[in-house]
Image (spheres, grey):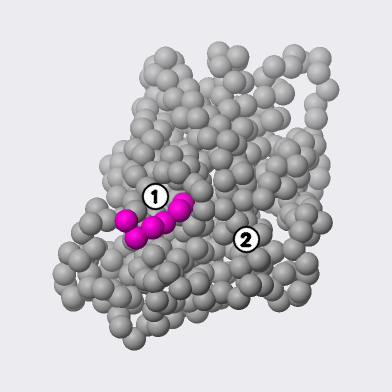
Amino acid sequence: MGTRVAAMGTRPAENHTSVPPKQDWRTVEERKIDDWLPVTASRNGKWWYSAFHNVTAMVGAGVLTLSYAMSELGWGPGVAVMTLSWIMTLYTLWQMVEMHEMVPGKRFDRYHELGQYATLGLWIVVLQQLVVEISMDIVYMITGGKLLKKFHDLVCDSSCKDIKLSYFIMIFASAQFVISQLPNFDSIATISLAAALMSICYSTIAWGASVDKGKADNVDYSLQASTTSGMVFDFLGGLGQMAFSISGHNVVLEIQASIPSTEETPSKKPMWKGVIVAYTIVLLCYFPVAFVGYWAFGNSVDDNILITLNTPKWLIAAANMMVVVHVIGSYQVYAMPVLDMMEMVLVRKMRFSPGWKLHLVSRSLFVAFTMFVGITFPFFGGLIRFFSGLAFAPTTYFLPCIIWLTVYKPRVFSLSWCANWFCIVGGVLLMVLGPIGGLRQIIMEAKTYQFYS
């Protein structure tokens, strides 16, 4: 696909400033800082690093909500939205991989650098990216705590003392305090590999156990809501959940930055190879979980299918721990660009000295912040729906297309032009409509929620 750039659009406009090939435009101080910052510290990544980093970023706990999203959309709309989401996000991810080195001699190692080059401005992209990545880490903090609690409740008999969710979130956070001190993407490669393998395992357990149980008695495939307003809100919420489920664009350039690049083998070749493997795994994980889970349980499925699957206990307990391992890796993949931004500001703007002390303080503060927010507002389903439409839709569906149109300027009504505008319109609709259902669910759950109970 990467060899067909000329067919999809013209070369970048000449009025953009290009950096001569092989010319290192950085000062000695900037090179020293770049060698310390998480995103640019190492360029020794392999194509399979790209594969499992992308799987870890994309196949999140959101896969467990897809059967529930199907119950809100129904068979026809659900299958259509899932298929379109997979195709559209693969296309926009390909665009970002292609644009990483579209200027000779320069690599856009961060999403906001690409946005600045395309004249979108720094803060338009940075704010969207930060909302996505911080909200994802908050959701993963909550998910990790909930799954640890679920594991405890499954393996412990009725005589065990009930432990509050807050304590399990703290237990999950304790692992993140330690792992967050690893310096860059290459250093978390083993964790990311384990997370990717776990995602395949628990997805297989989710749909395999559903097949084993078979279709529930008197299974009902009608929509959950009985009123028109309820159906509308549920439909919008389901859209948000599916927009959340297939996404990794917010970290794709940062992952590609860890791969070496030469004139003979630019980084986009191994990166795209890894992306294809990752998206194949996404296809094999997401579609069976969504469709088989809905087939088995209909509209009685929970917003986390592992909750619906209570037996056999040992298998569901194992699946919950697999998700915990995966979420540990996902948290780190999404945290790395945020930590990079934080430390870049601290070193370049506030003139702090780079070193392990700055790593320790800045990263511990970030983990503590996400832990505090997660303990305070543990609205798992609502948070996924709200943030997916609000932030994931722009950075995943239409910002790459806007940048592509701005830089390559494809001919009006050409295939590239039409494909990009299709993604832009669809992404804008997701951004506007997606958060509505999630906000409604947050409000409904907040009515009965007691802080730190």
**Which part of the image, by quadrant, shows the C terminus?**
top right
Residue 373 or residue 3, whichever sits in front: 3
Measured as percent of width and height from the top left, residue 413 is found at 16, 72
Q: In this view, does 126 lie above or below 340?
A: below
Q: Give the range drawn in magenta.
A: 259-264
Residue 246: image tag: none
Q: Which residue lies furthest to the bottom in this view?
A: 15
* Residue 31 belongs to the span the image colors magenta: no
Q: Taking the image as drawn, is residue 226 in sight? A: no
Q: How would you rate the neighbour count of disc 1 (Cα within 10 Å): few for under 14, some for 14-19, many for 20 or more?
A: many
Query: At numbered mark 1, what does the secondary structure look like: helix, strand or loop?
Result: helix
Residue 346 or residue 354, whichever sits in front: 354
Residue with the mark numbered 2: 35
Q: Taking the image as drawn, is residue 408 in sight? A: yes
* Residue 262 belongs to the span the image colors magenta: yes
Task: Give the side of residue 82 with respect to residue 143, left or right.
Answer: left
Residue visible at 49% across and 57% down in the picture? 257
**What's the amino acid at mark 1?**
Met
Measured as percent of width and height from the top left, residue 232 is found at 42, 54
Tell me which numbered mark, 2 or 1, is placed earlier along the sequence. 2
Measured as percent of width and height from the top left, residue 264 is found at 32, 56
Viewer-side label of 2, 1: 2
Residue visible at 36% across and 32% down in the picture? 284
Q: In this view, does 230 lie above or below 407?
A: above
Residue 270 or residue 163, whichever sits in front: 270
**What's the amino acid at mark 2?**
Asp
Residue with the mark numbered 1: 271
Residue visible at 76% across and 59% down in the picture? 355
Q: Give the spatial CA distance, label 2 vs label 1.
A: 21 Å
Residue visible at 30% across and 83% down in the picture? 14
Query: At numbered mark 2, what does the secondary structure look like: helix, strand or loop?
Result: loop
